[in-house]
Image (tube, grey):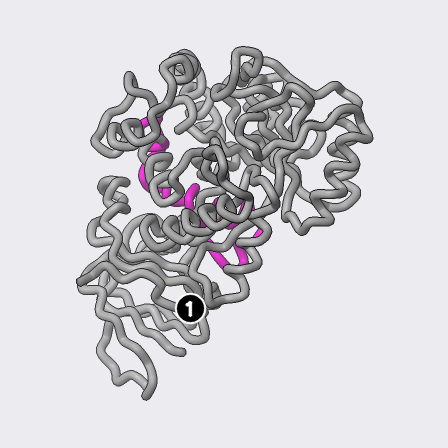
C-alpha cells in the first residue's frame, strides 16, 4: 500500500522548526521520500491525502504507563485486561500516542496486548512490556494490584526470572516509596537492602534486560545509576551528585511531573481542571503532591539544563490524555515546546532502543505519524487538535471531517 501526504507543515523532530509545503511518500509502512509539495501524478493504487497545511509530526510516546487502578470490586482479570486494551487503543486514536512503555501491569496484560497489537487486526500502540513491578513486602503502591512483593536477594532473582519467562521487555524495580500511597509508603524512604539491590541488578544484567528503576530520593537515584539502571523514574528529590551522575552515565531520566503537579491547587488550565474532576484524587494525596512539587520541578529543570538524557512519561490515566497533560507540565516547568516534542518522540524512541526505525520523520523509518491543525511549537496544547493518526503508514484515526 502506497500513501502520499501532501501540503504538510512538517515537524520532523530532527531539525528545529517547520518545513512548509512538504510531501511525504510512504510505501509498505515506511517513509521512502520527503520533498516539497510539487504536484506529480500518483501511481495507480496510491492514496493521496492533502493535509491542507496541517502540522505533521512523529507519533507521540508515553514511556511510563499503567492500567487503570484500583480495580473495581468484582472485576475479573479478563475484564481488567480488556479494559486496558481499550484504554491503549484510545490513547492511539484519541491522543496520537503510537507507542508506550509500561511500568507495571497485573496478569502480564501488557505482554498480551503487545502481542495482540503487533499481530495486526487490533488497533493499538506499540507496547514495551514490564509485567508486574517488583517491590519489597510492605513496598510501594501495593493497592494497585500491579505489584509483586519480593524479599531477600533470591526472592528478587526468582521474580525477575519469572518476569522474563512471561515475555517482558524490561524489569521494573520500585526502589523507594512514592507520593501516591499509604502513610508508610513515602518517597524519601528506600525499600531494598544493599544485597537485594545487588542481586536484582546482577540477574537483570546477566540476562541483558534493562532495569526501569522507580527511584524518588537521592540515595536511590545514585544506587540505580551506579548499578546500571537503564532509566530512573520520578526523581522527586535529587541532589547535585545525582545530576552529575545522570549526565555522565547512560541512564535516562523520566520525571513524571504529573504525579506531583496535578492537584487542585496547581491546576492552571481547563484540561488539568477537567482531569482532576474526573480522577477525584484524595485530599491527603493532593497535599503530599503539593508538598513535593516545588522540589520536583527544581530537579527537573536542573536535569534539563545539565543535558541529562530525558524522555516523556506520564504515570497517570486515562492514557488518551496522559501524555498531553505531561507535555504541558514540561513546558510549564521550563522546557521549550521543541524540547518537549523531542522528549515525546525522538528521545522516547531512543530510550526504548528503536531510534533506528521510529521517533522521527526520515526516509527509511516506519510511518507512525500524527497530524494536528495548529503548530505545537507555538503552543504545546495544539497537539490536542488531532486530525490524523497513522501507524506503519495505515490511517487508524481520521478526524478531519
| x then y, percent, for residue 168 | 65, 48
Residue drawn at point x = 62 percent, y = 34 percent: 133
Is disc 1 surrounded by few (<14), some (14 to 19) or many (20+) residues within 10 Å? many
Along the line of sight, which residue is nearer the eye, 27 or 261? Answer: 261
* Residue 47: image location, x then y, percent: 30, 77
Q: Is residue 95 left or right of residue 259?
A: left
Residue at the image point whose x is 45% and y is 54% from the top: 125
Magenta-span inclusion, residue 73: no
- 136 or 73, which is in the foreground? 73
Q: Is residue 38 above or below residue 339?
A: below
* Residue 335 shown in magenta: yes
Q: What count of labels does the image hold? A: 1
Give the structural element (helix, strand or loop) at label 1. Answer: strand
Q: Residue at x 70, y 21 (%)?
A: 192
Vertical comparison of 254 with 37: above or below? above
Residue 396 vs residue 307, the one in the foreground: 396
Q: Which quarter shows the C terminus?
A: bottom left
Residue 7: x percent and y percent? 22, 66
Chain part drawn in magenta: 330-359
Q: Is residue 132 visible?
A: yes
Write down the residue under mark 1: 31
Residue 98 position within the rendered picture, expressed as x and y whole percent measured from the top left: 42, 54
Q: Residue at x 62, y 38 (%)?
A: 132
Amino acid at each position: 500500500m502506497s500513501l502520499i501526504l501532501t501540503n504538510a507543515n512538517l515537524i520532523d523532530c530532527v531539525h528545529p522548526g517547520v518545513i512548509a509545503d512538504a510531501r511525504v511518500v510512504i510505501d509498505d509502512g515506511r517513509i521512502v521520500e520527503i520533498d516539497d509539495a510539487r504536484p506529480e501524478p500518483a501511481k495507480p493504487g496510491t492514496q493521496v491525502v492533502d493535509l491542507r497545511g496541517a502540522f505533521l509530526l512523529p507519533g507521540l510516546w508515553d514511556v511510563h504507563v499503567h492500567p487503570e487502578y484500583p480495580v473495581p470490586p468484582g472485576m475479573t482479570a479478563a475484564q481488567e485486561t480488556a479494559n486496558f486494551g481499550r484504554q491503549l487503543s484510545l490513547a492511539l486514536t484519541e491522543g496520537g500516542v503510537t507507542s508506550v512503555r509500561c511500568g507495571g501491569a497485573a496478569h502480564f496484560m501488557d505482554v498480551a496486548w503487545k502481542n495482540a497489537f503487533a499481530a495486526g487486526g487490533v488497533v493499538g500502540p506499540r507496547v514495551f512490556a514490564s509485567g508486574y513491578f517488583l517491590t519489597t513486602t510492605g513496598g510501594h503502591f501495593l493497592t494497585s494490584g500491579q505489584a509483586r512483593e519480593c524479599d531477600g536477594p533470591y526472592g528478587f532473582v526468582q521474580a525477575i526470572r519469572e518476569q522474563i519467562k512471561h515475555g517482558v521487555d524490561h524489569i521494573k524495580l520500585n526502589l523507594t516509596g512514592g507520593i501516591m500511597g499509604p502513610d508508610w509508603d513515602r518517597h524519601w524512604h528506600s525499600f531494598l537492602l544493599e544485597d537485594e539491590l545487588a542481586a536484582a541488578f546482577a540477574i537483570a544484567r546477566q540476562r541483558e534486560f534493562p532495569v526501569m528503576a522507580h527511584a524518588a530520593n537521592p540515595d536511590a537515584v545514585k544506587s540505580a545509576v551506579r548499578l546500571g539502571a537503564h532509566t530512573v523514574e520520578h526523581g522527586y528529590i535529587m541532589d547535585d551528585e545525582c545530576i552529575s551522575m545522570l549526565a555522565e552515565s547512560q541512564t535516562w531520566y523520566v520525571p513524571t511531573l504529573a504525579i506531583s503537579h496535578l492537584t487542585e491547587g496547581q491546576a492552571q488550565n481547563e484540561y488539568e481542571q477537567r482531569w482532576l474532576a474526573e480522577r477525584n484524587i484524595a485530599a491527603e494525596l493532593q497535599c503530599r503532591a503539593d508538598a513535593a512539587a516545588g522540589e520536583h520541578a527544581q530537579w527537573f529543570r536542573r536535569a534539563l539544563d545539565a543535558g541529562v538524557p530525558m524522555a516523556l512519561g506520564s504515570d497517570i490515566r486515562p492514557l488518551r490524555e496522559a501524555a498531553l497533560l505531561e507535555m504541558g507540565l514540561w513546558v510549564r516547568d521550563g522546557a521549550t515546546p521543541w524540547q518537549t516534542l523531542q522528549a515525546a518522540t525522538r528521545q522516547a524512541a531512543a530510550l526504548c532502543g528503536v531510534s533506528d526505525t521510529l521517533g522521527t520523520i526520515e526516509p527509511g523509518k516506519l510511518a507512525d505519524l500524527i497530524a494536528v491543525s495548529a503548530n505545537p511549537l507555538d503552543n504545546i496544547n495544539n497537539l490536542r487538535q488531532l486530525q490524523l493518526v497513522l501507524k506503519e503508514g495505515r490511517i487508524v484515526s481520521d478526524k478531519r471531517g
